[in-house]
């Protein structure tokens, strides 16, 4: 996919995450839609291009959410590189494995955010709040990852492969030769 399309998906992801998803899910932890995009980048992009896109997505998130500028860029890059090392060693065409990568990405993101905010924040209240949010965010990210995967699969099945839709691969639908 062209790189501006990833940034456009990221922009709409941040908008949806802060408006529609926030009103639909009243729990403390909401899914991170940009994390789902980072998982997609780890599956389909090279290290250089994916790292650059994760940096841009993180800056976009920090600028729109009002966090420390660069915090989510660093976290998304570290999550991307970690997931990329797993993807290179595993068969990532299985739906269960894709959802496991989303869960692992959520775990890594929470760990990196916990570490870096603990490093920069004098308040321990923030850390306990993040730990409370983590389990909700993990569950919702896996659910939204599955729903988005089904949506893109259905769109590609209906309209055919397109350069505007992210590629979807499902091992269960591939016949053995």
Image (cartoon, rainbow, N blue to C red):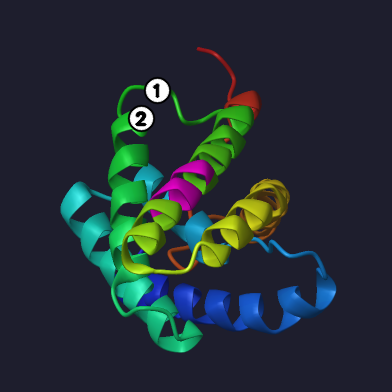
Placement of the N terminus among the 4 image quadrants = bottom left
At x 28% / y 61%, what residue is drawn? 74
Nearer the observer, 138 or 115: 115
Q: Start and end of the magenta stretch?
A: 107-112
**Residue highlighted by disc 2:** 86
Q: Residue furthest left?
A: 48
At x 50% / y 12%, what residue is drawn? 177
Specify the quadrant of the image occupied by residue 132: bottom right
Does 44 sit left or right of 103 as displayed? left
175 lies above or below 121:
above
Does 148 sit left or right of 122 as displayed? right
At x 28% / y 44%, what residue is drawn? 81
Does 95 sit left or right of 80 as displayed? right
Nearer the observer, 143 or 165: 143
117 lies above or below 10:
above
**Residue highlighted by disc 1:** 90
From where the camera sits, is residue 2 visible?
A: no
From where the camera sits, is residue 21 visible?
A: yes
CA–CA distance in space, label 1 to label 2: 6 Å
Residue 10 image offset from top left, x and y in percent: 46, 74
Nearer the observer, 3 or 82: 82
Q: Looking at the image, do the residues carrying marks 1 and 2 touch, with CB atoms under 8 Å apart?
A: yes
């Amino acid at each position: 996919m062209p790189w501006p399309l990833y940034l456009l998906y990221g922009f709409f992801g941040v908008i949806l995450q802060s408006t529609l998803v926030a009103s639909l899910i009243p729990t403390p932890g909401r899914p991170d839609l940009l994390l789902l995009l980072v998982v997609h980048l780890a599956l389909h992009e090279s290290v250089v291009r994916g790292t650059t896109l994760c940096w841009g997505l993180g800056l976009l998130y920090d600028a729109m959410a009002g966090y420390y500028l660069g915090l989510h860029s660093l976290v998304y890059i570290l999550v991307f590189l970690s997931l990329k090392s797993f993807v290179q060693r595993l068969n990532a065409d299985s739906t269960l494995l894709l959802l496991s990568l989303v869960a692992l990405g959520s775990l890594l993101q929470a760990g990196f955010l916990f570490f870096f905010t603990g490093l920069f924040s004098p308040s321990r209240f923030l850390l306990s709040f993040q730990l409370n949010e983590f389990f909700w965010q993990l569950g919702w990210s896996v659910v939204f990852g599955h729903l988005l995967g089904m949506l893109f699969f259905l769109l590609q099945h209906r309209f055919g492969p397109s350069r505007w839709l992210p590629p979807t691969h499902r091992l269960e639908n591939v016949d053995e030769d």
